[in-house]
Amino acid sequence: MTLREVVETTREGDRPSYQDTLRALGALVDAWRVRCMRLWVSPAGVRVVVPTRFGERWFAWPQLQQMAEARSRLRGQRRPSPQVPPARWEVVLRLAGHAMDRAGGQYFLVEAALGGRGQAATCVVESPQGVVLTAEEAVRQQVEIAWHYWRRGRRG
């Protein structure tokens, strides 16, 4: 899979793609400054469990759609992040969402943890049919994204 495939939105319909939705949720989670999380995705919404901080939070699809629309309006208007892309939840959850879009379905479990300085995050996405995104593929995609940003002289 190329970076271009990751960037494209792959789901159409009444609500934004999982990629756009989880990207917006990731931007919020970046502000929480947490290192690991677990997401349960269902037709009702997304349950976020952060064992080290808040415990559990629930986001219904209408709320997530508003977040995704607001995030897309801000795209390109903010200053670049001081962190390289793989060190941000926005990027990690976007990759998870892209894998979910490609797999199709309504039920997913996402388990992820940010890496240390200079290390990729771990992220695994599972559905009732099996693994949708392996930790190895998530790392490969993060390396590709980081290389793309550094090549262009940008940090995020």
Image (cartoon, rainbow, N blue to C red):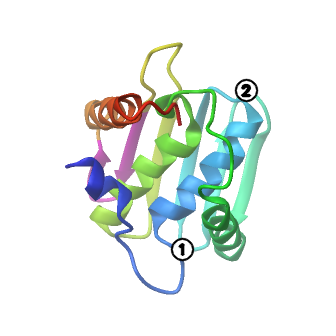
Question: Where does label 2 land, which residue?
Answer: 52
Which residue is situated farthest in the top direction here? 117
Span colored in magenta:
123-133
Mark linked to residue 43: 1
- Between the C-alphas of marks 1 and 2, the distance is 26 Å
- The three-letter amino acid code for the residue at tag 2 is Thr
Which residue is situated farthest in the right direction here? 54
Q: Nearer the viewer, residue 124 or 24?
A: 24
| Quadrant in the picture for residue 24 | bottom right
Residue in the image at 69% along x and 31% along y? 51
Which residue is situated farthest in the front direction here? 153
- The reply to whether the magenta stretch includes residue 121 is no
69 lies above or below 3? below
Q: Main secondary structure of the magenta part?
A: strand
Residue 118 picture location, percent across and down: 46, 14
- The reply to whether the magenta stretch includes residue 129 is yes
- Please tell me how crowded label 2 is: few (under 14), some (14-19), or many (20+) other residues with Cα within 10 Å: few
Residue in the image at 48% along x and 40% along y? 92
119 lies above or below 144? above
Residue 146 picture location, percent across and down: 39, 31
| Quadrant in the picture for residue 52 | top right
Residue in the image at 39% along x and 68% along y? 9
- The three-letter amino acid code for the residue at tag 1 is Pro
In the image, taking residue 108 as reference, residue 59 lies left or right, namely right
Q: Could you tell me which secondary element the residue under label 1 belongs to? A: loop
